[in-house]
Image (tube, grey):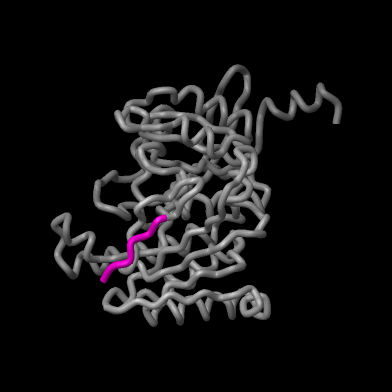
Amino acid sequence: MSWISKIISRKKKKNIRLAFYGEVNAGKTTLANRIANDLGYDDLGPVSEIPHETRKVIKLENANLKRDGYELNFTLMDMPGIASTVDYRNFVKFGLTEAEAIQRAKEATKGILEAIKMIDQVDVALVILDSTKTPFEQVNLTIIGNLQLQKIPIIIIANKIDLPDSRPELVRQTFSDQTIVSVSAKTGDNIEALYDAIIANS
Amino acid sequence: MKYYIDFITKNVTNKLTTFEKIKMIIRLVRQNRVLILENGLTPEEEAELIKQTMLVIDFDNFIGLEFFKWNRGLPESKKFFKKSSLANESQYTVVAPSEAVQVIENSDDLLSIELGS
């Protein structure tokens, strides 16, 4: 393919599947809502301090991102947070009844299964990390390892940079060979850099 | 609650298929065993471990497990790949019942876990 045809082909891209992966409460849905709002859509899903608020894959289909002459059509997929433990008693601490908590836990286990099974259906993955925590959280390493095996482009998001104990530099050190963008999904800080990275990696 | 620590050599795990390995791990963890696997799990095996764990969680007797891949003294440039990629040599995987472990420190050089009841 000549350089001219490469440029032309990048002007209008096919509909790619852009998936949000990460541990529980990393801010995936907050970021998905931020992007949806920036593109003129309503919130994709509710945000909560109770873990496993997102228990099914939520999709925003046929979204369109335009940047500097490039146009990207994509389906945004907000995945349930990945975990290897689901304890309904943690939900009771937030005021849910035991029955509500057990139901939430059952839905959470199904959501985790669904999210892992869908890894090979993704074109570009955004792995959202809570930059106030250690980047060595095992589920993050597992997700990234599997995405690498599938040769899926990865953008690592060091989220929550608005918080005082955020350490995005630690994320950069740990994943030094990856595309990394530090953002605050909550405040929108540095979100433009994320859009540039999405275009560059799609 | 008593917990036991089992060191499992690669001679054992290398003979097993992924499915057999994951089944063995979950069976032992449900028997309150903390496993130190000499031959660490691959990312695919880790994903399979999470999937199979989700299928057997029953909320009363088994709420899941925690696992950690760990190795010592990696040079800066190798950290990411050693932690997460295909390379599996000299890596250990620790698998434990969720309620048994609390991570005290998980850094480049030290994985410190408190075992409790």
Residue B91 screen position, x and y as percent:
60, 59
> Which segment did they paint magenta?
B112-117
The image shows residue A110, relative to residue A38, as above or below, that is below
Residue B18 screen position, x and y as percent:
62, 74
Q: Is residue A200 visible?
A: yes
Q: Which of the pair A134/A155 is nearer the observer?
A: A134
Q: Is residue A107 visible?
A: no
Secondary structure that dominates the magenta span: strand
Residue A195 screen position, x and y as percent:
52, 27
Q: If the image is split into quadrants, where does the N terminus of chain B sit?
A: bottom left
| Residue occupying the point 37% across, 26% down | A188
| Residue occupying the point 66% across, 78% down | B11
Which quadrant of the figure has residue B112?
A: bottom left
Q: Is residue B11 magenta?
A: no
Residue farthest top in this picture: A68
Which quadrant of the figure has residue B87?
A: bottom right
Image-based side of B44 in relation to A171, left or right = right
Which quadrant of the figure has residue A158?
A: top left
| Residue occupying the point 33% across, 66% down | B115
